[in-house]
Image (cartoon, grey):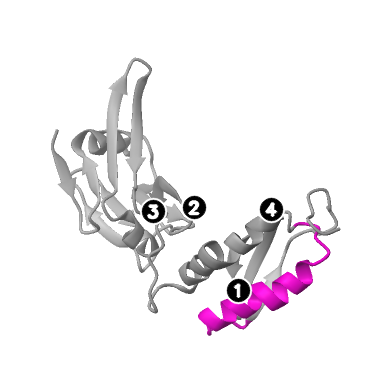
Amino acid sequence: MTAVQSDVNLTITESAQDYLAELLSKQDDVIGVRVFITQPGTPKAETCIAYCREGDANDNDVVVDYKQFKAYYEGRSVPFLDEAYIDYSTDRMGGQLTIKAPNARLPKVSADSPVEDRINYVLYNEINPSLAAHGGEVSLLEVTEDQYAVLKFGGGCQGCGMVDVTLKEGVEKTLLEQVPELAGVKDTTDHSNTENAYFK
């Protein structure tokens, strides 16, 4: 089985390339495939392959030409796609495309990393371990244009009477110290549901 190595240190086997090319040939408006990781560098990281249509590609994408198609690798995901392996194998049920990205969940942040990655690093490595003692967790939804981190609390934090204190004294203080360009944090969680709350 031969494989092609790309500039992003990711391997797409020949069988996977043939399979992807066949899928693409059945679409009218696609320009290639797009590979990206949602919530890279966190325990919730998921590696995804999608059709790439006009307008889907971004300026920071790394574009790699394969024999039968182009692959657009999301710039932010590239460090986390290191040593990833995409393969296609046939079985009695037809076949299956598999993606192995051993570094997708490993935190890889530096001062040059995107703000979202640095926030996720702090949330998952410093803040969530503390909240876990109360059965809670917090995740990043987005960073607004005015540099506010929009957060969602879950588990024992949702509906918790102490969440405002946790948000301001704990989470916001820690994030602002480590990600100084942030203006602050906002909470989108519905705290009227107190079913799992640690403090009611």
The kind of residue tagged 4 is Gly
> Which label was assigned to residue 144?
1
Disc on the earlier residue, 4 or 3 = 3
- Secondary element type, mark 2: loop
Residue name at image x 34 percent, y 36 percent: 98
The kind of residue tagged 3 is Ala
Q: Nearer the viewer, residue 45 or 38?
A: 45
In the displayed image of the protein, which residue is found farthest to the top? 92
In the image, is residue 55 above or below residue 97? below
Observer able to see residue 131: yes
- Secondary element type, mark 3: loop
Magenta span: 158-183
Disc on the earlier residue, 2 or 3 = 2
| Disc 2: which residue | 43
Disc on the earlier residue, 2 or 1 = 2
| Disc 3: which residue | 104
In the image, is residue 11 above or below residue 81? above
